[in-house]
Image (tube, rainbow, N blue to C red):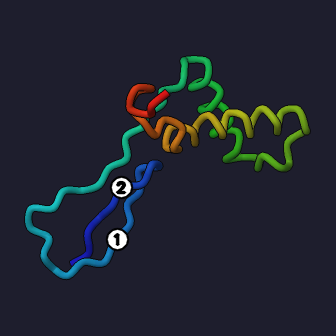
């Protein structure tokens, strides 16, 4: 029976297993970055807009804002904050 892994967008994927699933926990990604209220509004508005019009068909200036908000959304699950503190990093 396959293990289920959570992805950032809420979907799941199956991983191969040797059938020994007892006691295993589901792997879940936790964001290390929280966008501000303005950023969340921009992310949501462009998410809804992109359901109708893809970003590359938008006018240049609006498409650039769309990519900027997409970058902020993806930053939540990126490796920007690899160390918990600057002391752990050594700087």
The residue that label 1 is drawn on is: 14
In the image: residue 89, left or right of residue 53? left
Residue depicted at x 37% and y 40%: 30
Mark 1 or 2, nearer chain start: 2
Relative to 90, residue 37 above or below? above
Residue 38 figure quarter? top right
Q: Position of residue 60 (x, y in %)?
A: 90, 38
Q: Viewed as shown, does residue 27 lie left or right of 22?
A: right
Q: Quadrant of the N terminus?
A: bottom left
Residue at 48% across, 35% down? 81
Rendered residue at 37%/60% (across/down)? 12
Q: Indicate left or right for 86 with 39 as reference.
A: left
Pointer 1: residues within 10 angstroms few (<14), some, or many (20+)?
few
Kindly state the secondary structure of the residue where label 1 is placed: strand
**Residue farthest toward the top in the current orientation of the protein:** 37
Residue to which mark 2 is pinned: 6
Q: Which mark is residue 46?
A: none
Residue 62, by quadrant, is top right
**Image vertical order of residue 4 relative to residue 39, above or below:** below
- Is residue 9 depicted above or below 35 in this figure? below
**Residue farthest to the front?**
90
Name the one closer to the observer, 17 or 46: 17
Q: Position of residue 53 (x, y in %)?
A: 77, 47
């Amino acid at each position: 029976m396959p293990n289920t892994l959570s992805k950032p967008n809420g979907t799941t994927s199956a991983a191969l297993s040797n059938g020994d699933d007892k006691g295993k926990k589901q792997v879940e990604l936790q964001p290390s970055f929280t966008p501000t209220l303005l950023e969340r509004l921009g992310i949501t508005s462009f998410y809804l807009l992109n359901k109708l019009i893809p970003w590359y068909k938008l006018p240049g200036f609006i498409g650039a804002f769309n990519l900027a908000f997409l970058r902020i959304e993806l930053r939540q699950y990126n490796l920007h904050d690899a160390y918990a503190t600057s002391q752990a990093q050594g700087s």
